[in-house]
Amino acid sequence: LKYSEEIAKRKKLYNQIQEAKGNIRVFCRCRPLSKQEVSTGYSAVVDFDAAKDGEIGIMNGVTKKSFKFDRVYTPKDNQADVYADASPLVTSVLDGYNVCIFAYGQTGTGKTFTMEGTEQNRGVNYRTLKELFKIAEERNETYSYNISVSVLEVYNEQIRDLLATSPSTKKLEVRQAAEGFHHVPGIVEAKVENIKEAWDVLQAGSNARSVGSNNVNEHSSRSHCMLCIMVRAKNLMDGVCTKSKLWLVDLAGSERLTKTDVQGERLKEAQNINRSLSALGDVISALATKNNHIPYRNSKLTHLLQDSLGGDSKALMFVQISPSENDLGETVSSLNFASRVRGVELGLAKKQV
Ligand code: ADP
């Protein structure tokens, strides 16, 4: 009873905050031109003049199309700058909220760079986990936390447990537990005590991703990589327990079908990616327009994320783009998707010359 009272209290408070704020924030990140793009002679088509105000312009000849987001990162912004804006969500998870952070965009635009990063240049995943353990430690006189991680991949509308030691014989499905919590029965939840343990588990999951695929890069660009951090908290003062989860998701590449993809396995993959990404867009826009029916069940991706999208959860989307003229079509398409998610779109404007 205490638990449900506590949740009801939080929901009420949070709904009041939401009235003013909206619970899905969209940040746009543009990578630098690659060496290859520079040597080919491609130029950048992105205008960052109003980036400080969350506005980004895409030049197509003399026409500029502008998009507005909660934040725009230029290629000069580093991993710490990007994480600084995501970090308040870590406190939310430890306070009992469900959170989802995901990266969307065309392959090669920096989704993995933003989420995973490199050893010298850690991304959102590592920084988030590090802070999670740090705050949990700081609160250890008031709360006892139990943290576990799962690593899943969704490929062709099938869920794969990347921490499973042997391949599952049963098809993994999303189920709703008695208290309304969605989970995947049978997946590994590895209990972790500190950042090192957590990171080792995530690395193991990451390595398992490539097993059985001919081309590692292609496989990862066509599947959604999903880390789930489960936080069970007990308030040591009043005994109230909460359970919350944090999803960290590196989505499959959002690029559209090309002429060479019109048949076979690649067509099926592309259709499944389109289906799940548009299901994600549908869910978010249904939430934004306060629609009564939220179509979570239209894809494995949205079904898995159900508890962390909508209700009193908090979501953050990174829309990743390339600055190159060569990627203009995909860039505009990604920004349109992200605008739909945010529910705001600015019109066309002539460039001031
Ligand atoms: P994706 O996951 O979207 O396919 P990657 O994360 O693999 O893209 O990024 C593609 C390449 O661009 C990688 O070599 C990556 O290191 C580089 N890159 C991406 N974003 C940035 C950035 N903000 N700064 C520097 N390099 C970046």
Image (cartoon, rainbow, N blue to C red):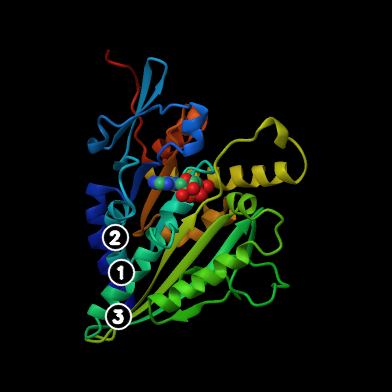
Q: Position of residue 297 (x, y in %)?
A: 56, 54
| Label 3 residue SS | helix
Picture quadrant where residue 240 is located: bottom left
Please state, as top left, top right, bottom left or bottom right, where the C terminus lies in the image: top left
Dots 2, 1 in contact, CB < 8 A: yes
Q: Position of residue 156 (x, y in %)?
A: 67, 53
Residue at the spot of label 2:
87
| Label 2 residue SS | loop
Q: Residues within 10 Å of mark 1 (few under 14, many from 20)?
A: some
Q: Tell me the kind of residue under disc 3.
A: Lys
Residue at the spot of label 1:
131
Q: Tell me the kind of residue under disc 1.
A: Glu
Dots 2, 3 in contact, CB < 8 A: no
**Residue found at x 30% / y 80%:** 2
Q: Position of residue 19 (x, y in %)?
A: 25, 49
Picture quadrant where residue 314 is located: bottom left
Picture quadrant where residue 30 is located: top left
- Mark 3 close to ligand 1, CB under 8 Å: no
**Residue found at x 46% / y 39%:** 34
Q: Tell me the kind of residue under disc 2.
A: Ser
